[in-house]
Image: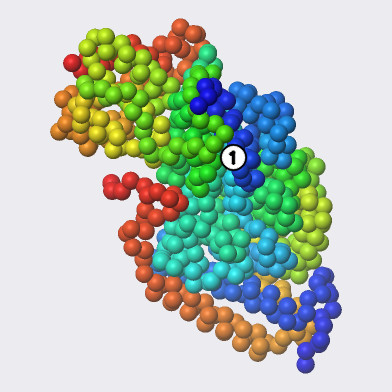
Amino acid sequence: MKKEAVEPTEAGTESPAELVRLFREMLRIRVFEDQSIKAFRAGLAGGYLHVYSGQEAVAVGWLSCIRNDDPVITAYRDHGHALYLGCDPVAVMAEIMGRTGGLSRGKGGSMHLYSAAHRFYGGWGIVGGHTGIGVGLAFGTKYKGGDQVTHLFMGDGAVNAGILYEAMNMASLWDLPVVFIVENNQYAMGTRVEYHSADPELHNRAAGFRMEHERIDGMDVLRVRRDAKRIIEHVRKTQRPYFVEIMSYRFEGHGAADVEQTLYRSPEEIEQAKKRDPILLLEKHMLEHDVINKDELEKIRKEIQEEMEEVYKKAAALPHPEPEEVYRDVYTDIEPEKGH
Amino acid sequence: MAEITYREALRQALIEEMERDENVFLIGEDIGRYQGSFRVTQNLIKQFGSKRVVDTPISEPGFVGIAMGAALQGLRPVVEMMTMSFSILAFDQIINHVAKIHYMSGGQFKVPMVIRGPGGSAHQLSAQHSHSVEGWYAHVPGLKVVAPSTPEDAYGMLKTAIRDDNPVIFTENPNLYGLKGEAPTGDDFTIPFGKAAIRRFGEDVSLIAYSRMAHVCAEAAAELEKEGISAEVIDVRSLMPLDSETLFESVKKTHRAVVVYEDWKFGGFGAEIAAKIQESCFDDLDAPVLRVGGLNVPMPYSRKLELLCVPNNNDVVEKVKSLF
């Protein structure tokens, strides 16, 4: 029999229903990513595919604490954010497959997911390049007198890009409500953080901009939520930027083309990290607190597996864009010159 | 119509657009308290305050990105580049982000922003402050690129640029800021993009240029007239969208064309115009399409050498005479 409320362990006072929901959301991302890898291997997805497996607690934990009118922007490892924000998984998978009905009409692909309806501003392929834009979203909020907080996600590889420092300086100088969120999965492609950053405690970078900063655990979704709630509330109140480094781990390679991970990390290291798999951690927490039993868990797993297999099938059945689509949306009002 | 300078025409357009739409704001280096390095934004901070005339650090990629984010939020930023040479620092932001988001998002987002400033050589600014950037940007799908040559165009086209829902690169030749001319002000006068201006009608050769070179061509045409050659001068004004029709009509009439541009001759925008004429008007041509462009060297400091690098009326006259 379920308990009515779950005692906080390390963190969190989530209701049983909320815990199950968080579990489902993380699992949906994981299974979606398994399907996206399948699509890549089947030749249905091309280009680059950067999957989010292992980092689910970051997107789910953080984004479950934002307000639905808060802008969100991220880099190219963007599937998890798009899904949690409520984008139709068929549209996301269709985008990865470059199909009509894709979230970005098949023009963006895996790295360039956008949904204006969900205030999701992407989806950017130049490392660190979107950080100025994220600060600009917060600039727009301040200009218009709103109280939204912009959530600006980036990977640890982005912390050495010059534009981030320009953006951080102006965010602090102008009191802009933005949270710089580094998802430190510990590898910039195949370069471990110790090999790319003079100070591997990346959050320290914010000190020079008089910005509050801290490092938090990104594998336990409840801890992410505890910290995210506090930080977001603080930023909304102070209207000041904040820099948070969320410690995470990437279970898959950098991209689908990264097939030789042993060149830069050991299988043992990956196995070790998987002991803190965010999905298993929450599962364990729920079992220990009788929120759920193994049969119910199995049922959820089966449901989500079926849902995502269906997503895959539906996306793969969508048509490829018509040739005329290539000229559409270059400009809002004029067409580019046609022909080769 | 009043006679005003090119600089004043730009300033007047900014004022009227800022008064008309509170989402329009200016952002750039030293545009507020310092009053703008070329004084285009003089006194605007007093009129509109620091919320709408935003002084930035020297951080071109950063403030272009921030302006773009603000545009995604529905604002209409006008970014001043102290010189367009500095926009090269923000090349990634402009090309990879600003120009592409509308397409990459399948039309979900638009970026109504203007990036304006002086481009081209002026009085001994030397190699790093003398770039003609218009050809680089015209090369990029998603950007509109204009280069007005008169106060009237500066005024009317800047208003059009600010109202455009697409990103617009608006280049101003620094030699033109003091140029006087008649321009309507204080009303709702705008000049649409994609329409070339015929500055002078002629029968024997089409001189095609934009920005300051349109004036050089007008001077050359006056000299050619003395030698019995009637030159038509077309001021392209808008590189993207480009009014090919007006160019082609002119060439069909004159059967000869010389394209004049200040940018490095090799690979500059004039090459695109020349190629277009050749592709579309081959049967109408009595001579090859020729180009007069800037010398293919970094801009030297020496006044004598600098003047050598930029096409002048004699260069144009000589080139035209070689066609006959």
What residue is at 36 percent from the left and 18 percent from the top?
A: B218
Q: Dot 1 falls on which chain?
A: B
Q: Residue furthest bottom?
A: A1
Rendering coords of residue A45 (x, y %): 43, 64
Q: Is residue B294 left or right of residue B102?
A: left
| Circle 1 residue | B17
Q: Residue at x 39, y 72 (%)?
A: A318
Q: Is residue B82 left or right of residue B295?
A: right
Q: How many marks?
A: 1
Q: Is residue B67 left or right of residue A293?
A: left
For the residue carrying disc 1, how many other residues have a C-alpha within 10 Å: few (<14), some (14-19), or many (20+)?
many
Q: Position of residue B140 (x, y in %)?
A: 43, 41
Q: Residue at x 64, y 74 (%)?
A: A25
Q: Quadrant of residue B64?
A: top right
Above or below: residue B46 compared with residue A338 = above
Nearer the observer, B83 or B97:
B83
Q: Secondary structure at mark 1?
A: helix
- Residue at the spot 41% in from the left edge and 24% down from the top edge: B263
A56 vs A338, nearest the viewer: A338
Image height of B292 relative to A240, above or below? above
Q: Tell me the amino acid under the disc marked 1.
A: Glu
Residue B322 in the image: state x and y as whole percent: 22, 14
Compare residues B266 and A303 and report the one nearer the observer.
B266
Q: Is residue A281 visible?
A: yes
- Give the position of the N terminus of chain A as an image quadrant: bottom right
- Asked which quadrant contains residue B27, the reply is top right
Q: Is residue A194 visible?
A: no
The location of residue B239, given as percent across then percent down, is 39, 35
- The outermost residue toward the top is B304
The coloring applied to the image is: rainbow
